[in-house]
Image: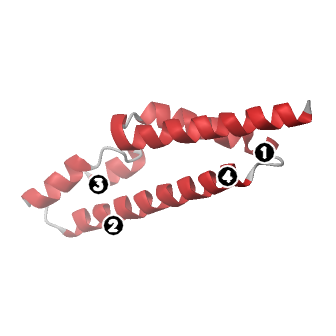
Amino acid sequence: MFILSNLTGDLFILVIIKAMQYNMAHTKDRYLHTNCLAMLANMSSKFVHLQSYVCQRLVNFYITLMKRHHKTVERLQLCDMKSEGDEEAESVKNNLTNVSPSLQKRAC
């Protein structure tokens, strides 16, 4: 019973990560992404004896999220440095679709 429950937990984690990666690359739905992250966060205290492949995918996904966050913060800082009437700054603001609402308010 322990092995079966452990495998289904690993599979569930992999499916959630794959759904979030697809969402980041194609659909860019904020609500799906938020809910998937919430599911992983709520279950994280129960993650025990994960397989190495699942751990590797979790770490790689976290690194991808951090890189995107860092890139978004850099774009927002660049946008703040530019003048308000600059067209390039406005296009950067309009292209930031995967940003949390608090960061979007800061960009405007």
Q: CA distance from mark 3 to mark 2?
A: 11 Å
Mark nearest the camera among 2 and 4 is 4
Q: Which residue is mark 2?
A: 74
Q: Earlier in the sequence, mark 3 or mark 2?
A: 2
| Residue at 56% from the left image edge and 42% from the top image edge | 17
Q: Residue at x 25, y 67 (%)?
A: 78
Task: Say which label, 2 or 4, has the lower sequence index.
Answer: 4
Q: In the displayed structure, would residue 77 be above or below residue 40? A: below
Residue 53 is marked as: 4
The CA distance from mark 3 to mark 1 is 37 Å
Q: Residue at x 64, y 35 (%)?
A: 39
N-terminal-most mark, 1 or 4: 1
Residue 96 visible in the shown view: yes
Q: Nearer the viewer, mark 3 or mark 2?
A: 2
Disc 1 or disc 4, which is closer to the eye? 4
Above or below, comparing residue 88 to residue 21 in the picture: below
The answer for how far apart the CA atoms under marks 2 and 4 are is 32 Å
SS of the residue at dot 3?
helix
- CA separation in Å, label 4 and label 3: 38 Å
Q: Earlier in the sequence, mark 1 or mark 2?
A: 1
Location of residue 95 in the rendering, given as x and y in whole percent from the top left corner: 23, 48
Q: Is residue 85 visible?
A: no
Amino acid at pointer 1: Phe
Secondary element type, mark 2: helix
